[in-house]
Image (spheres, rainbow, N blue to C red):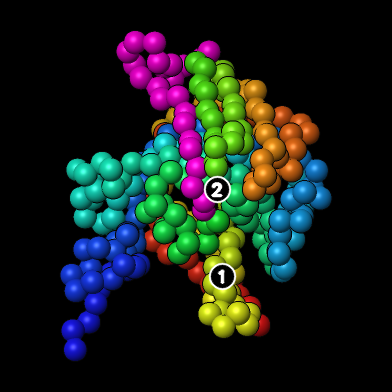
Amino acid sequence: MTGVRGFLPPKSATGRSAIVPAPPWHYSGDLLTVEYRTDPARVRELLPEPLELAPDDPGAVALIWADWQSCGADTTELLDPVRAQYKECFAVVRCAYRGRTYSRCAYIWVDKDFAIARGIHQGYPKKLGSIHLTRPHPYGPAPRIEPGAVFGATLAAADRRLAQAVVTLREPSETNGFVNAHPMAHHRQLPAIDGKGLALDELIASGAAAFEGGQAWRGEADLALFEAPTEELAALTIDEPIGAYYRQVGVTWNGGTLLERGL
């Protein structure tokens, strides 16, 4: 009997129909990050056991817009850009597990199906959305990467605007923020087909297998969040601004490690 191939479905005799190839996955992109503080109780209610609040600055949140080009090991997607280019916006909090601090993606929206498929494998809670952010360019009216440059960003899902930001760069920065600076602690979960519990229940950690980045910049942001019938991002209220950042990065993701399995 002939087998079928493919890292993720749909699988076929050749594997060509699979929605994404096997890792490693490579990403090149522009990141626009806005950090602020919310009520730590709002973060705590998003952390399932055994995760706990981070011991320092437990209410810190990062809302990140990203404009990506991505590909598998053979990079063929880069020459077929519809398979490579996508945008996302994601909310990151921090948590603690056995005395170590992790980052954790609480909400995330993307605009391509292949990005959702990768997220299912990685433990990211991805949903479809409409994401836009200003692109820098050295010519014309687009902002340059320099003091005073102004960027806009918007997020919408199911025809409702969820967030918008205007970021003004002020100066070079040593970091791109601190909330999303740790390994990620995510759950990979799949309900059992008979409705009795979970067929897959893992707490995993993952991060960049390789990373390179340009000069980070910092500044300030005017950020607004909006209520929507099927979204809860606005519950992470903006109680105190921290700062805003811009950076161009290259990242490779190539798997993670199991922290524990559900009982």
Q: Which amino acid does the dot numbered 1 rest on?
A: Gln
Q: Which amino acid does the dot numbered 2 rest on?
A: Ile
Give the image quarter of residue 67: top left
Q: Residue at x 19, y 43 (%)?
A: 79
Say the numbered circle drawn on residue 180.
Answer: none
Q: Residues within 10 Å of mark 2 (few under 14, many from 20)?
A: many
Q: Main secondary structure of the magenta part?
A: loop
Does the rendering let one see residue 40? yes
Q: Residues within 10 Å of mark 1 (few under 14, many from 20)?
A: some
Element at label 2: strand
The residue that label 2 is drawn on is: 108
Picture coordinates of residue 139, whole percent (x, y): 32, 13
Picture coordinates of residue 212, whole percent (x, y): 39, 42
Picture coordinates of residue 188, whole percent (x, y): 54, 68
- Asked if residue 46 lies left or right of residue 103, the reply is right
Residue 147 in magenta stretch: yes
Q: Residue at x 76, y 31 (%)?
A: 240
Q: Which region is colored magenta? A: 126-148
Quadrant in the picture for the N terminus: bottom left
Element at label 1: strand
The answer for how far apart the CA atoms under marks 2 and 1 are is 16 Å
Quadrant in the picture for the C terminus: bottom right
- Location of residue 13 with respect to 104 vertically, above or below: below
- Asked if residue 76 lies left or right of residue 232, the reply is left
The residue that label 1 is drawn on is: 189
Which residue is farthest bottom?
1
